[in-house]
Image (cartoon, helix red, strand yellow):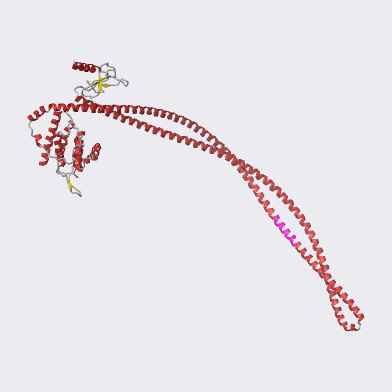
């Protein structure tokens, strides 16, 4: 508690002395200014109070840069600050980075805001500080309230030439124990040097301000050009959107006309198809009845034809059997004739033998008696042979009679079969004529069916045409959808361009605000009042109203706003190294002063 109270009192004293000395000096503070250095030392002690030691492989160390890095996560505006601190190559330790972070936060006039964000998240700070640390108690909030007063001070601190890593943070109490009289004497002695320093600083600041004003003017011109281009693109986009809307309306009208035509055509074709289907059904019913009758007649005639063919086959089989029997009889007769020829030859041989025997009997009567027995035997044999010959002749006669009977029967069968065959031929011719008539009727029916199929194909073609028209309508709908999507895209582009224009307007307003800040700083440095752009609507000299063609121009000497004709002169002022714009009245006055000084 004693440490916290002592640090609290030291912080109050350091902030009070810093503000008083900065206001009495009246210029931007450097890093060599002792009260500012002591303020940073006291701030460092406050941030180090109650820090937890972090262990590493080298050893334990304490650094207040760790909690300051949390500001980057909690406040996105501090990301540039921490990245610039990390990117400084001269800083090698967390202590140096923490000091550089404090320097940059004071230059940005946001040290109080950043520390307030840290104090609002004490649950995160508890990882770095003890529970009784200054930043964890109420004194931290009091210090943040005191730091708000530092926003009055302008500081220009250089980080490149200083060794922030090895500086020793020791509080110099001599600054706070000096008498006020000595301070006043020191002020009187160093008044001249302060005025000279102020003059040089003002000149440098004017140069810097002139450069920034030129850069801002070029930026404003570029923004105006981009704005004009965006406006032209907007106009072209609006014209294109209007043209697309007109085309969309025309396409809608054409689509409606096509749809009406297609609907009418579809209705007419539906009615025609209904009528044709009814007629087709009626004709088909009649044709089906005719076809069933003809089919029945065909079946009966086929049955009759099959029966006749069966009878024909039976008769042909009988005829074939008769022919086979005739062939067998012919074979028997030929065999019998051969046997008769053989028997006749045998008879002739027997006759020859009888003649020889007779001759022999005449020649040898003596041997007749011996051979009578043989003759008698031969006679018996001849009687037997004669009887067999007679029998064979009887058989021949019977075979000839049977042959004659068979020939008579064959002739009769031929006559009967010829009559039947002629009758069957007549029936076949009659059936062929009926078949030809039925085939003709079938051909006519097939032709009717072909005509009906052609009509069906025509109806299918019409339906296909209707389908193609419907597909065209669908394609037109798709094109409409595409056009609508393009319209939506163009609307999105227009909205984005409007947002870009709004952002450009915001940038312009911010640049104008910066210009106003710069002008206010220039006013403070000079003794003249610098008029704002919004306060002047007319030229101060000719009192003509400002417009786009007649622009506003500041006089660098008096700070009032004039038109281009009333402020076309340029002169070198002591605060500006180069000739700058001056109004006519200031031009004449300054010329008079120069002439009087010269005389």
Which image quadrant for residue 129?
top left
- Furthest residue in direction front, as rendered: 599
Q: Residue at x 7, y 30 (%)?
A: 182
**Visible in this render: residue 103?**
yes
Residue extent of the magenta highlight: 308-322
Look at the image and tell me in which quarter the C terminus lies.
top left
Query: What percent of the width, then of the height, locates residue 156?
Result: 19, 32
Query: What percent of the width, then of the height, locates residue 36?
Result: 15, 34
Left or right of residue 313, residue 354 in this image: right
**Visible in this render: residue 113?**
no
Q: Is residue 389 above or below residue 451?
A: below
Query: What percent of the width, then of the height, locates residue 225?
Result: 34, 27
Which image quadrant for residue 318?
bottom right
**Magenta span main SS:** helix
- Furthest residue in direction right, as rendered: 362
Query: What percent of the width, then of the height, locates residue 183?
Result: 9, 30
Look at the image and tell me in which quarter the N terminus lies.
top left
Left or right of residue 60, residue 440 in this image: right
Asked whether 316 falls inside the magenta stretch, the response is: yes
Q: Nearer the viewer, residue 341 or 224?
A: 224
Left or right of residue 373, residue 262 in this image: left
Q: Nearer the viewer, residue 213 or 51?
A: 213
Asked whether 14 falls inside the magenta stretch, the response is: no
């Amino acid at each position: 508690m004693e440490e916290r109270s002592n640090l609290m009192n030291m912080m109050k004293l350091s902030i009070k002395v810093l503000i008083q000395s900065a206001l009495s000096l009246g210029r931007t503070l450097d890093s060599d200014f002792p009260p500012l250095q002591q303020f940073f030392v006291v701030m460092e002690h406050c941030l180090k109070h109650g820090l937890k030691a972090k262990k590493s492989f080298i050893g334990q160390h304490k650094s207040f840069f760790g909690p300051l890095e949390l500001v980057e996560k909690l406040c996105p505006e501090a990301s540039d600050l921490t990245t610039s601190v990390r990117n400084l190559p001269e800083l090698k330790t967390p202590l140096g980075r923490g000091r550089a972070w404090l320097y940059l936060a004071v230059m940005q006039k946001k040290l109080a805001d950043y520390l307030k964000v840290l104090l609002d998240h004490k649950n995160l700070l508890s990882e770095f500080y003890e529970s009784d640390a200054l930043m964890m108690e109420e004194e931290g909030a009091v210090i943040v309230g005191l730091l708000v007063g530092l926003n009055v001070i302008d500081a220009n601190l250089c980080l490149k030439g200083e060794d922030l890593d090895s500086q020793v943070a020791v509080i110099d109490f001599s600054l706070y124990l000096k008498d006020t009289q000595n301070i006043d004497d020191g002020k009187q002695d160093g008044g001249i040097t302060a005025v000279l320093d102020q003059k040089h600083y003002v000149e440098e600041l004017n140069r810097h301000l002139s450069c920034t004003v030129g850069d801002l003017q070029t930026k404003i011109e570029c923004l105006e050009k981009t704005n004009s281009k965006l406006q032209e693109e907007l106009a072209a986009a609006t014209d294109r959107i209007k043209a697309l809307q007109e085309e969309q309306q025309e396409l809608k009208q054409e689509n409606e006309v096509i749809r009406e035509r297609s609907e009418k055509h579809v209705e007419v074709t539906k009615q025609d198809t209904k009528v044709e289907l009814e007629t087709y059904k009626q004709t088909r019913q009649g044709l089906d009845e005719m076809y069933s009758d003809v089919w029945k007649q065909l079946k009966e005639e086929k049955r009759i034809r099959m029966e006749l063919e069966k009878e024909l086959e039976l008769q042909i089989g009988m005829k074939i059997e008769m022919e086979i029997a005739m062939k067998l009889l012919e074979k028997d007769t030929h065999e019998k004739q051969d046997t008769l020829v053989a028997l006749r030859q045998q008879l002739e041989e027997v006759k020859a033998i009888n003649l020889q025997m007779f001759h022999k009997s005449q020649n040898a009567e003596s041997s007749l008696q011996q051979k009578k027995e043989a003759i008698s035997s031969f006679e018996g044999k001849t009687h037997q042979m004669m009887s067999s010959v007679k029998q064979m002749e009887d058989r021949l006669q019977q075979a000839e009679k049977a042959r004659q009977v068979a020939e008579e029967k064959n002739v009769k069968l031929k006559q009967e079969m010829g009559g039947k065959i002629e009758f069957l031929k007549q029936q076949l011719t009659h059936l062929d004529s009926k078949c030809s008539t039925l085939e003709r009727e079938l051909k006519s029916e097939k032709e009717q069916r072909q005509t009906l199929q052609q009509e069906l194909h025509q109806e299918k073609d019409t339906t296909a045409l209707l389908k193609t028209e419907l597909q065209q309508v669908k394609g037109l709908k798709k094109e409409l959808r595409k056009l609508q999507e393009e319209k939506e895209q163009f609307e999105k582009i227009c909205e984005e361009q409007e947002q870009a224009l709004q952002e450009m307007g915001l940038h312009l307003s911010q640049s104008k605000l910066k210009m106003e800040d710069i002008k206010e700083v220039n006013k403070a440095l000079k003794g003249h009042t610098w008029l704002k752009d919004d306060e002047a609507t007319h030229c101060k000299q000719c009192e003509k109203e400002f417009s786009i063609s007649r622009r506003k121009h500041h006089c660098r000497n008096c700070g009032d706003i004039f038109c281009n004709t009333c402020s076309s002169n340029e002169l070198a002022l002591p605060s500006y190294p180069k000739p700058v714009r001056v109004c006519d009245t200031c031009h004449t006055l300054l010329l008079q002063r120069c002439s009087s000084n010269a005389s």
